[in-house]
Image: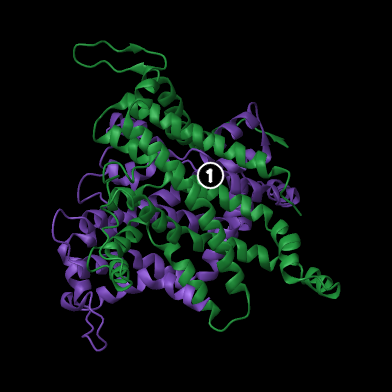
Amino acid sequence: MEQHRGAWLLVLPAALFIFAFTNIPLLATLVSSLYTSPIAGHGGGFVGLDNYRDLLSDPSFRTSLVNNLIYAAVTVPASVILALLMALGVNAAIPGRATLRLSFFLPTMLPMIAVGAIWLFFYTPQYGLVDRFTRFIGLGDINWLGNTATALPAMMAVAIWKQAGFFMIFYLAALQNIPPVLREAASLEGVSRFYFFRRVTVPLLGPTTLFVMVTAAINAFCVVDHVIEMTQGGPDNASSLLLYYVYQAGFRDWDLDTAAAATVVLVLILGLLAAGMFALFGRRVHYR
Amino acid sequence: MWLFGLLWALPLLYAIWAAVHPPLYATEFELGSPVTLGNFARAWHAAPFARYFLNTVLLVSFTVTGQCVLATLAAFAFARFSFRGRDLLFSALLLQLMVSPSILLVWNYREISWLGLANTIPAMGIPYLGSALGIFLLRQNFRTIPTELDDAARLEGCSLLGRLWKVYVPLSRSTYVAFGLTSIAYHWNDFLWPLVISDSVTTRPLTVGLEIFATPEQGVQWSLVTAATLLSSAPLLVAFLIFQRQFVQSFLRIGIR
């Protein structure tokens, strides 16, 4: 390892930008969530956890938080399972599997905003394909995005559609890395295919599953493009997510204290998620 | 599996159907409906998409080039030099892998406004210029390069930056490709940060322009919206279809570290 006086200078530009737009804003957000900003008539000052108390007593924050937890609890496992099924499907020697792979993967390459526009059309009452289908099977017209019961599930479907194909490629790569010798040995021993899948394939896919789950969970809390475009969190906050709440508080209500406190909650969740997943899976994951 | 694949492609196919038929036929499935490319031309002129395209291209090239340059310098120092506080600094920077600048949008908006850069194209890229991911990947790669090569270059009188440029960078091409493609895809599709920081036709990228076009207050012309959607996603989709293997390899490489 070389000593060099110039080494610091090499790191400086990148460090400057990362500190200025990640570390410092994070600290500043944390600090400002403990203060109120001075408004006309009131001086600002240290208020401890008051902003958090206000936040928790705000029904639209509570709704956004609960929505986001449900959203994550559905989109993460659903995307992971679908991705695994897709990978198993296109890993087998079936005709036209390149086309199939493409069909699964293409949504991933579209911007979330394009995906949102496509699904906005897909969900349109009367004209959308979804509504035509529900009418065809006799369920009648459903305004998917305008109904408090269906708006959040509709957002989930969009997110799953966009990301499952991305996770598929990781499973596909992992499946192709499983040595064929294992399969041959198992068939010599007369092991059933399901048993082989459960006891050999699934454990070997452990690291991939961990990675995919962490990525899906991060997406569930950090991507709200489709909410902004398709429902604006509505109707009646039914499809509002945490980051959308932050965006509203910061740029519609200009309530920076609330936005800061909500951001801290979001960051805490992300931190817990990362720590929790590694603690939970750390022992069960088989690294080769 | 085929049925599942078809179902999966349905939203996209429906959008393509609407985009290539005259508005009257957009939601009617009649074989033999006249096929037209007119929607694309009309969508192109219905909003300043040419300008949006330019903005996105400028934004992406500025951001990705900047990321690569800054990450290369930093990764070199982290990989091959020892200096005080190196490991502490490295872990502090890796915080960005968990907390991306885009969720700190309220504070970053304040910072960019203080700097007087709000509503400019650089402003949309600046928070991302320092890339912890780029530094991490390049550092991993630089550490695998045999020091003998480096020593040889030094004996021949190569300067510090000369060694970096002549030995390290050429031997890390695949890492640059992987990081570059991933980053291009990310910033081409990025929406939330550009939405808050850009406020006019001259800075707005495609994603923001498309959002405005797709959600007007009343009366949505679906054939135009779907055409605009496909248009704005087309460059990346075409690039993907041509360089499919490279894209997938890059994503895999960045994913599984």
Residue A243 position in % (x across, y down): 38, 39
* Residues packed near mark 1 inside 10 Å, few (<14), some (14 to 19) or many (20 plus): many
State the count of labels.
1
Placement of B229 over or under A65, stated as above or below: below
Chain identifier of the purple chain: B
Q: Amino acid at mark 1?
A: Ala
Q: Is residue B101 left or right of residue B145?
A: left
Residue B59 percent across, percent down from the top left = 35, 51
Is residue B9 shown left or right of residue A200? left
* Quarter of the figure that contains the C terminus of chain A: bottom right
Image coloring type: by chain
Q: Position of residue B170 (x, y in %)?
A: 60, 57
What residue is at 59 percent from the left and 43 percent from the top? B75
Q: Which chain is green?
A: A
What chain does mark 1 sit on?
A: B
Q: Which residue has dot 1 on it?
A: B71
Above or below: residue A135 compared with residue B136: below
Identify the residue at the far right of this view.
Answer: A189
Q: Is A65 in front, or is B33?
A: A65
Q: Is residue A259 visible?
A: yes
Closest to the observer, A16 or A9: A16
